[in-house]
Amino acid sequence: MEQIKIDSFLDFKYISNLTSNPSQTQMAFAVGKANLKKNEYNYDLFVSDGKRHTRITTLKKGSHFIWENDQTLLFPLAKNKSEEKKIKEDKRSIYYRYHLIDRKLEKAFEFDFPVTVEDQLDGNKLLLSAALTAEQHRLYQDNKADRKKFLDEQKKSSLYEDINEIPFYFNGNGFTANVRKQLFIFDIETKVVAPILDPNFSFNIIKVSDDKKHVFFTGTIATPVKTLTSQAYVYHLDSKTIDTLYAENDFAFRGLYLLKNKVIVSGSDMKDFGLNQNSDFYVLNHNKLELLNLYGGSIGNSVGSDVRLGGNQSNLIFNDKLYFTSTVDDHVELNSLDLNGEIKCEYPFNGSIDGFCILNHQIYVVGLYRQKLQEIYMVDTEQKKQEQRTRINQRALKNLYVAKPRPVYVKHDTHIVKGWVLYPKDYDPALKYPAILDIHGGPKTVYGQVYYHEMQFWANKGYFVCFANPRGSDGKGDVFADIRGKYGTMDYQDLMDFTDLVLKKTPSIDQNQVFVTGGSYGGFMTNWMVGHTHIFKAAVTQRSIANWLSFHGTSDIGFYFSKDQTAGHPNLDTDLLWEQSPMKYAQNIQTPLLFIHSDKDYRCPIEQAMQLFTILKQRGLDTKFVWFKEETHELSRSGKPQARLKRLNEITDWFEKYRK
């Protein structure tokens, strides 16, 4: 078996936007791949009947498309430099149409402002969405001369930001103060754009009815401090009116579904377990939430991996039921919900369902199965079996050593912590090997038994790699996930107990050669660990939290996340936040520590790394700070290819520096 290399991910392909046509007789999906030379990702568009998969065109740098009808697809595209200039400098959007029958590509629409085409509606109309300030509505309202004047004025004002609300920026989106997510109806014949929302309203979730005459959505009028709750509405295309479906301000909507003329929603009031409280299902009826199922489970997929790019739909209506994904323990299951409130596990996928669609009355999923990269599988819910239908990544891992996760269980009276160990390539029980503890982010996510490139690369470099789901993780209910006000206590103890058990059960690990790393919450825990134990030879903290007091006002989610997770306010409960901050224990740190952080990470702002690095450097500790420019919180997963290579090289070199 050959060795997985640091740049092997450049050969990986990523499947996104798996979607069937209106009659569900064909499906389409985008396939992305890294382009190292251009330092970007490029996408191709495929169509399939479930057995034959045909590349039809390139989408270039994006993966978005929609089915216009059974035989045509719409997607944004710039075919030449002139169109690229229109999009970038003139703030226009250009959509192309691809005809499947005659394989013809033609320019379909050019919009006067940056939009996303969401759906084809009844009466030759399109549903559009856009993120705009109130002033930017002029882009489609002004005449040509006034529009140019406005754009010139916008360029001048790009030197500053007027901020009067929080959050003022958002990870991956830049500055968002005064920007609202708006909806529009575009008449294809008249070319008229009609906004359907108040300019100060921002939508969250949208769902179009089967007859294409009604647009259901959640959202709220913007306030100086963003709320986590919202309201629900429906727009009637024929009458051009909006009805309020839920007007209260006491519910966090996380899902909106249309089932047999009923409006089903998922979400919570966040009263028992805070903002991470698992969701229940309700029927929305006469401005009331009528309980349908007290689910309390994790809706969606929180299984971590670094071999995804782009998203897929995670719920749809099939056989008069709502089908949705749910994270259970360490994997993702496909569940169904009917109008009687009955929830049934339709398929317990032993891995990660990254999205799914319906094709010819069968369910097709994009999955990470065992230690394979993404492929499309047909799942038989009756026979409880699956069949792999694509071989997109067949060659990427061929003849390479892929370690199989070996489970380790830490059993307590109150709970069980599940984790795994990857054994190094060419393992010889007579030899000693170093080990790396890798800690997931969230904290409410999970590790599963799916391929993780950085871990497999380290196993191929001769390391044992250990990873686990401590308390705070997803997949085991609200009580297990609830560590509010207890950061660095029960979660830390679980990880230390796991590490101790791995060392006890794996005598081939050199106990003087144990390393630790993690990102986001995993970065917080790395910072915490090196301030509370000296068992690690070296550590790497990535996109981390070091100081809850400053995180509160600098993170895009800090103003609500820090209060919820620490159970305190930075002014009113200063000592409580400081007690849970790794910065408090910086004087205890003896472990050589490498910092990996990005300057456009607005989730865990780079000042968090700056604070702790400065203290450790002043103390004379061996420390280094790798500052990534123009990257975000997503560096390890969807960062630019060259930056991802640099990151993994830096982490590995840091461990190798301290490896005997």
Image (cartoon, grey):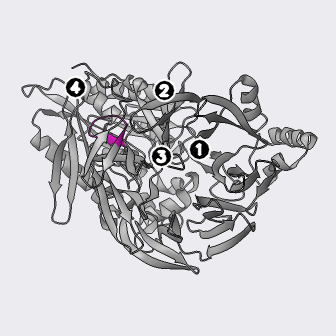
Question: In the image, is residue 138 above or below residue 156?
Answer: below
Q: Is residue 113 left or right of residue 51?
A: right
Q: How far across and down, in percent of the image, does residue 382 sit?
A: 27, 55
Question: Do the residues bearing badges 1 and 4 touch, measured as CB atoms within 8 Å?
Answer: no
Inspect the image, locate mark 1, and give the three-letter code of the amino acid beneath it: Ile
Q: Secondary structure at mark 1?
A: strand
Badge 1 vs badge 3, beta-carbon distance below 8 Å: no
Residue, disc 3: 312
* Image coords of residue 573 (percent x, y): 48, 67
Of pointers 4 and 2, the one earlier in the residue sequence: 2
Residue 335 visible, this orientation = yes
Q: How many marks?
A: 4
Q: CA separation, marks 2 and 3?
A: 19 Å
Marks 4 and 2: CB-CB under 8 Å?
no
Q: Is residue 376 magenta?
A: yes
Q: Indicate which label's residue lies in the foreground, 1 or 3.
A: 1
Of discs 4 and 2, which sits in the foreground? 2
Considering depth in this image, is 363 or 418 the residue closer to the camera?
363
Place residue 620 in its image quadrant. Answer: top left
CA–CA distance in space, label 1 to label 3: 12 Å
- On the image, the x and y values in percent for residue 432 come to 13, 28
Q: Which residues are magenta?
A: 367-377
